Image: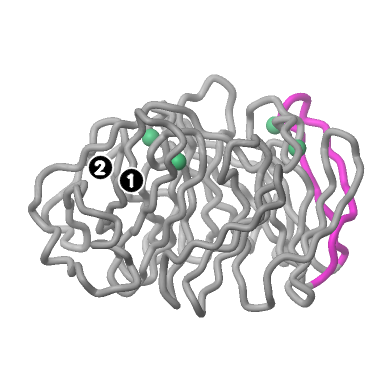
Amino acid sequence: MHLRFEPRRQCFRRVAHLSLEKSTINPNTSALSKGDIAGAGSLYLPWTTHRRPVDYDFDSRADFAVWRRSSATWFIVNSRTGTTREKQWGEFTDVPVPAEYNDDFNADLAIFRPRTGEWWVTLSGSGQTVITQWGLQGDVPVPADYNGDGFADRAVWRPSEGNWYVLPSAFSASSFRQPFIQQWGIEGDVPVPADYDGDGLPDIAIWRPSDGTWWVMRSSDGSFSVTQWGLPGDIPVPGYYHSGGRGVDFAVWRPSEGNWYVRQSDDDAMWSQQWGVRTDIPAPGDYDGDGITDFAVWRPLEGNWFVIRSSNRSTFVRQWGTVGDVPVP
Ligand SMILES: [Ca+2]
Ligand SMILES: [Ca+2]
Ligand SMILES: [Ca+2]
Ligand SMILES: [Ca+2]
């Protein structure tokens, strides 16, 4: 059941889509406070296109990939050919943010550098490096295709303010290109942007660990929903877990049990799947390329990936990575 927003929950406030120049709302300045953007109208974004998963070799299947913090090196198994590659990109304190930032259809190796607020993207086609200043120390990177041109937009969520700062990409003339700020969430929340309402575009959303609620601002009509799903200690793992579903399902992984709890976004059906143990890191993705998210965990001590293929329920294990790595499938 989707609950309507209730005014007594004061932690969220709807604000406008802003028609401001990029320089005006650079998150690295304090030019805009929350007071400046409150009450400026209703949110409207022309969501029009689809979302693509991270895929390093353009075969519509997730690839086993880790980022080794100690050497800032990416290790990737291409799902298309089985060949492997490695590339040094980033530094120890960076946050990996792989996504498709340009129009060559392969995921680009990318990092967000917290100490400078810079995004370093190496374009997979040309090898060109693009550095973009967007964010501040303490921000959480939340790249997604907010403007619907098919490519990831650089975006950060600032816990201290609950503000989302989005810098849309500009590959389509018909897409929305204005940077915008959206207040959504409070400190302690986990940003979980994904397309829950199934209109093809990510919705700004957070999961609140203290009470397990999902707060979704729907891109389709700007309305919002609050759905209780999960408990403190869970890890949110939204995904497309069932066939025929339009939107991304609410899902959490419970380390204490290794259980995945799914609540389907389009019909509220609820079910669970046991997969993984307490020390694993959930790494869901579409490894078999059927369009459905596969339950998957990565086990740091062994570097093993354990996957249930959604297409036929078969399971497989692949060794890739070592303790200390960050899985980036
Ligand atoms: Ca792939
Ligand atoms: Ca985009
Ligand atoms: Ca959506
Ligand atoms: Ca799958």
- When the figure is inspected, residue 104 is found, relative to residue 280, above or below; the finding is above
On the image, numbered disc 2 is attached to which residue? 224
Question: Within 8 Å of ligand 3, the CB of disc 1?
Answer: no
Q: Circle 1 — which element?
A: strand
Tell me the kind of residue under disc 1. Val
Residue 301's tag is none
Residue that appears at 45% across and 66% down: 133
Q: Are marks 1 and 2 in contact (CB under 8 Å)?
A: yes
Q: Circle 2 — which element?
A: strand
Residue that appears at 19% across and 67% down: 32
289 sits to left or right of 227: right
Residue that appears at 77% across and 77% down: 70
Residue 203 x/y as whole percent: 37, 42
Q: How is the image coloured?
A: one colour
On the image, numbered disc 1 is attached to which residue? 216
Q: Which quadrant of the view contains residue 113?
A: bottom right
